[in-house]
Image (tube, coloured by chain):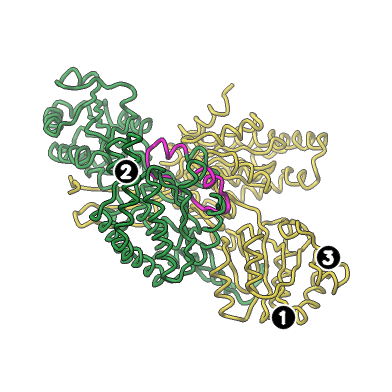
Chain colours: A yellow, B green
Amino acid sequence: MASALDKIKLAKQAANSLGLSSTVVKNQVLANIAALLPERAAQIIAANQKDLDRGVIEGLASGLMDRLRLDEKRIDSLAAAVTEVISLPDPIGDVVRGKTLANGVRLAEVRVPFGVIGVIYEARPNVTIDIAALAIKSGNAAVLRGGSAAQETNAVLIQLLQDALELAGVNRDAVQTVDEFGRDGGTQMMQAVGLIDVLIPRGSAGLIHAVINDSKVPVIQTGDGVVHIFVDESARLDWAVDIIINAKTQRVSVCNALETLLIHQRAYQRVMPEIMQALAAKDVVVHGDEQVAGDFENVVPATDADWSTEYMSLDLSVKVVADLDEALAHIAVYSTKHTESIITESNSNADRFLAEVDAAVVMVNASTRFTDGGEFGFGAEVGISTQKLHARGPMGLQELTSTKWLVRGAGQIRS
Amino acid sequence: MASALDKIKLAKQAANSLGLSSTVVKNQVLANIAALLPERAAQIIAANQKDLDRGVIEGLASGLMDRLRLDEKRIDSLAAAVTEVISLPDPIGDVVRGKTLANGVRLAEVRVPFGVIGVIYEARPNVTIDIAALAIKSGNAAVLRGGSAAQETNAVLIQLLQDALELAGVNRDAVQTVDEFGRDGGTQMMQAVGLIDVLIPRGSAGLIHAVINDSKVPVIQTGDGVVHIFVDESARLDWAVDIIINAKTQRVSVCNALETLLIHQRAYQRVMPEIMQALAAKDVVVHGDEQVAGDFENVVPATDADWSTEYMSLDLSVKVVADLDEALAHIAVYSTKHTESIITESNSNADRFLAEVDAAVVMVNASTRFTDGGEFGFGAEVGISTQKLHARGPMGLQELTSTKWLVRGAGQIRS
């Protein structure tokens, strides 16, 4: 049997077959995937049932079981998502910069695929298809390591992806799984310098930080969001209530959901009662500082740990701050550099917040839920980069590319 | 005494003071550096003499001694280089992308400083000034770790840089050295996740690979160049000779110099005699494959190691290949992904070479010596990135920046 390293090498060897393919060919691969998914629904569901049965035996939590499950309807929406990627513009070959030097040498910096992308994620078989579609459209071979709880499902999906490549005349090795090697598959990926060009961990903060800590291959950090909203002294109450409720309650298990609310001391009397009422109406559990816990009922006293907790639930930390400076200082300590928003009518405070907060996305008077590739108009999202190298904020197809400089001369030499 | 970690934290705390400074203020810092360098020449030279004296005792190689030495003339050229950075455009605040969403939310992705840049380099005090100037212009605090052989000189230069910051009203802590902690200074930098945003090693391949291997902080790989030129069947002889001689001999100790020459078998008879004659006239030592060693005099038989050697000297590996495919295969194995060039009159072979070679810069009919920030018109160069994440090829001020998304709304929420 091939080792994990052998399979990574296969992906590397196949990378040019996919990377040099035209947009037409890559779109054909995607069309094949979209067609094969419903065709093979029975086979996929049967494999998925094995994973689900094992999940029951192993006592998988109900949330994980739900993410693991594929049925005909979910398979159809996966196919629809792949079809949408067909319509997205292909970034490969775009000219980023270019010029002609005085000596006539012509330079062009053009977008190229990375080569081989590695993705380490948890037991969500839909990620297998989503990520493969984005990798294929951007011309990248992909080595995937999904959670072992989804191993049977992923094996069938990888076979399908490889068949879709081959049917379009592309080397089928361009998509690989190392699921069958368990943890060692991930370890081999993190060591594969020169074979895998970039590694993207998707999932829990624990998974992401383990990969950042252990990987020798460059990593793009995505994910965890301890997201703040600061209600400034001059905040409009109606905007504050609408934005806080939207950011906290529209969808709780996402990285752009609100986790900590900061309230300006001089806005407190004016805005707090209505905000607390609106939160209570949505069953939000407030973890408040001393002042909030003293003034309102049903408030859990906040612990130090609360300020750095990404609840992913209907919980919210609330703290009163003396001024913008204290809000900025709190955010600087506890922000995961994902998304931060200020509600204010003060132009100078808005400008200071935008300039001084160090995060991928900094907002004025808008819901933090807008930090999303779809909302930003990217059409697809690989994840939200919370680091500063290469990509920051929502990552679309363009963020899955590198560039190279093409130089065309007519015998020029350097003097 | 402060620890290396303390000094890294000082730089982090001072980063906003520099990062939020206007271009006018940053240019004033640079003007102060340019003025202080000649003013303090005597002090710098005295400190440098101590380093040189220790270098003699420790038996430093003459090349290293030369790179270590600062005299009045070199100090003046350092000041002139800093003055040039003043005239370069400031990338901070440039809008990269932007749009207004259907709901009226306005998005702008703008260039921001990384925050804190770490640079680990060898005993070249000019790098201390060069890198600090580029960091300051791009709004980045800098933690520098120069070679211990230049420790006395660097201490005086860091003091000068900090005075230049303070004279312009910027927090002087924005430039730090950890030289006094020896190897531990570098180790602390590589562990400083969340404090140092990006680490750039400059120097030998050994230094660069040690940093890539050990660093938890994201690294931009610069440097080593096993650079190839492929003389295709249809190559113009005059261009081939000019480009090969320029790429190999104009300056031998640079990363964009030619190291391996590949000759198409069917061009061999036509081009080789003149190429070999031109190389001999420049005292180039040819390490040839069997065919070359058999056909020409004074050829050193090439060993396997030669194909992956960056000579940095008047040595050149030469290999005859059957065709473009064999040239591409050889380059794929031995390229360090810096610069590769083809000499050809065939348009389709030029296109294949540009598309299929995986390197930062790929050329047709031009000298590999053009891979340079100055030649590309960047005005300054931090190094040549040979990796694919964030920056590829010559890195100027723009490559020392990240971006962030600024989002301005009027109470919008996500539906």
Q: Quick one: which residue is furthest to the right in this view?
A: A297
Instruction: Specify start and end residues of the magenta stretch as a single range.
Output: B186-210
Is the residue under label 3 in contact with that under label 2 (CB below 8 Å)? no
Q: Residue A13 carries which label?
A: none
Tell me which chain the residue with mark 3 is part of: A
Q: What element carries label 3?
A: loop
Q: Name the residue under label 3.
A: A283
Let me know if residue B203 is in the magenta part: yes
Residue at 41% from the left image edge and 62% from the top image edge:
B136
Is the residue under label 2 in contact with that under label 1 (CB below 8 Å)? no
Mark 1: give few (<14), some (14-19) or many (20+) Cα within 10 Å.
some
In this picture, is A179 found above or below B150? above
Q: Which of marks 2 and 3 is in front?
A: 2
Q: Name the residue under label 2.
A: B52
Q: Earlier in the sequence, mark 3 or mark 1?
A: 1
Q: Between residues A78 and A52, which one lies in front from this camera angle?
A: A52
